[in-house]
Image (cartoon, grey):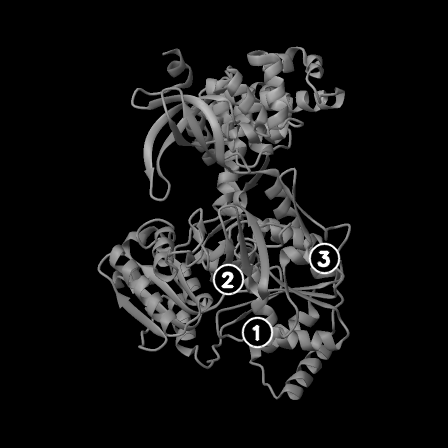
Amino acid sequence: MEFQQNLGFHSAEEELTGVVDHIIFSAGDGAFSVFRLRLAQQGKCTATVRGAAPLVGQEVYLAGSWVTHPRFGRQFQAQRMRVSAPTSAAGIERFLASGTIDGVGPAMARRIVERFGAEALQIIERAPSRLKEVAGIGPKTVEKIVASYMRQSELRDIMLWLEEHGVTGAYAARIFKAYGSLAIEVMEKAPYRLAQEIDGIGFITADTIAVAAGWEKNSSERIAAGLSYELTQISSGGHCCIPEAMLADRAAQRLGVTRTEVMEIISREVKMSRLYAVDEMGERLIYAPQLYKAEEMTARLLLMLQKKADHIHVHDAESLVAAWESDHAVSLAPAQREAVIASLTHGVLVLTGGPGTGKTTVVRSMIDILGAQGLEILLAAPTGRAAKRLAEATGCPAATVHRMLEAQGREDGEMRFGRDAETQLEADVIIIDEVSMMDIVLMQHLLTAVLPGTHVILVGDVDQLPAVGPGSVLKDILRSNVIPSVRLTEIFRQNNTGTIVLNAHAINAGRVPSFTEADFTFVPAVSSEDAAAQIVSLCTRLLRAGTGLMDLQVLSPMRREACGVDLLNRSLQNALNPAGMGKEEAAGFRLGDKVMQTRNDYMKNVFNGDIGRITRIDSEHMVVTFAENMDIPYTRDEFGALTLAYAMSVHKSQGSEYDIVILPLVRAHHIMLQRNLLYTAVTRAKKGVIIVGDRMALFAAVSNDRTRRRYTLLAERLAEKI
């Protein structure tokens, strides 16, 4: 069949033809839809398709397979869809009455079809002035009908263009929203713009469209777009740059072109300042412009702030610290005293140390002494949970870095903040906690917003996992030996956390932790599946014994596997918050579920990593209650910003503390069995750690101190700018 050949249908797929009867569900972003289809053969069926919903009354051709949904029963799951305008008078009336054409309701639709019959749509397209022959339609209504109909026609044309070029029509609504009537022209002449300008469309999809539109594999625009994509992938792995040879090899393999062709485009892009090249330690390193600027600016601003701050004389600083110790009946350890004095005598200070080494005591004393001098102090941390901990520990207000900088969302792919070089923060001292979580871009934005003369104190544990984003900011600043720093190593035992603190330091030193029956427990498991079952049982018992759901957290090194985050979340949801009669649920979420926000939403004022519970939910809406009883509404198309949070990755837990942490360690996690990951997980617990799994996996994690190299040059930039 011609239809099969044009759309790339396979003989194993079934085909359906029919008219859309009504729409059951359509995601706001056009990613998914469910509708009832009046079959050409006989009867009706429910169909699901990736992509925007067709319109009521439209004729559709579907290819896919029959499936049985556990809740909604038998339905046709379409892999491909082709849409055409209705041709029968009845179909046209249903289409016009569906509410998709402005100015036309059921009664008006009936009158239009009674007047023009099966030619009604041709009249709208070719002779719209004749619509005034229908009672109740004047010139303004004609304009409305024509404009609305043309929008729907253009959307249909985009969908057809995509399908005819072997690309799913799922992206049609987003492309039309971005480019309107120019959409097909953009797809044909500048397809790689889609990856830069439309959320949810990346290089792979844009490249599929480009190749389908006839672009040559070795075109310079395609290779340049491929290089940009590779650099984005590299930065998501924590790197700021990459050796040129490695970049060329990766891009050549992905694009199916020669290494020589890629090297030529790299040289061209560098000459045009669309990429940056730095020669360092015998390697030529390639940067995307944003990350080159971020490293360069961070180094320059750190050194400027170090020089420009008003310093207190060392002798006076020592006297102030001694007076504080006397007033508070506290005797600081030598390293703690050194850190407090350094905060007074230097423009920028880095304070690092593991759990139980007295960082909080030092920060409190800094706040007291600096505040007593009449200085304005701001406190912040990268996440809401870390900011809350900082506020509780110091007794002073603390915000997230994003909130402090008045984040306003993205524009042209870059983050925008209300506080920047033009409108800087009004403070004499800024203290940032959990700096190990900050990537190079956020650090650049922070320092850009700091007034010259402000003291900046960066606090964090350099032995924890680095930021999810690009850079190793805290580690690189310390490695440079340019910015004053103090490392606290003496352990001060604290009530109820002694074993956890001592074991964390043991792990960091490469020693196997000591287990007790009280606050540091090992539960053996013979397999990943056994470990997962043990974890579900432990969580169930702990909650029944009175542990709060928000005070108990399962952390996993990986997302996949039986003990990975994804499967553990489903198992824990079913055990701790099972489905039941009358309990509302939608899209895999249930009333009462513990959930996490997975991306920053500046309009809602919720950020990646924020944890809450679902307090209201139906098929189209939910409300999540976050910390401080903040109720945030979500519509169905926003559900994708949330994920279950009974279990989470160790990375996601950074900056948080929980009463009890449960950690699976099994051999299936071998890739992620690393000392700093184990150390980070253990240091999230306040009252108890339970490790479930295989002792050999535990030994492997403790022994593995090899951390993957991140390609960054912040330390070198700091050193060369002195």
Q: Is residue 162 above or below residue 611?
A: above
Residue drawn at x 65%, y 57% is: 403
Give, as a three-letter code, the residue at label 3: Val
Total numbered labels placed on residues in the image: 3
Mark 3 or mark 1, which is nearer the start of the sequence? 1
Residue with the mark numbered 1: 360
Q: Nearer the viewer, residue 653 or 292?
A: 653
Q: Place residue 12 in its image quadrant.
A: top left
Residue with the mark numbered 2: 462
Q: Is residue 721 left or right of residue 685?
A: right
Residue with the mark numbered 3: 450
State the separation of the CA atoms marked 1 and 3: 23 Å
Q: Nearer the viewer, residue 165 or 288?
A: 165
Mark 2 or mark 1, which is nearer the start of the sequence? 1
Give, as a three-letter code, the residue at label 1: Thr
Residue drawn at x 57%, y 74% is: 360
Q: Secondary structure at mark 1?
A: helix
State the separation of the CA atoms marked 2 and 3: 23 Å
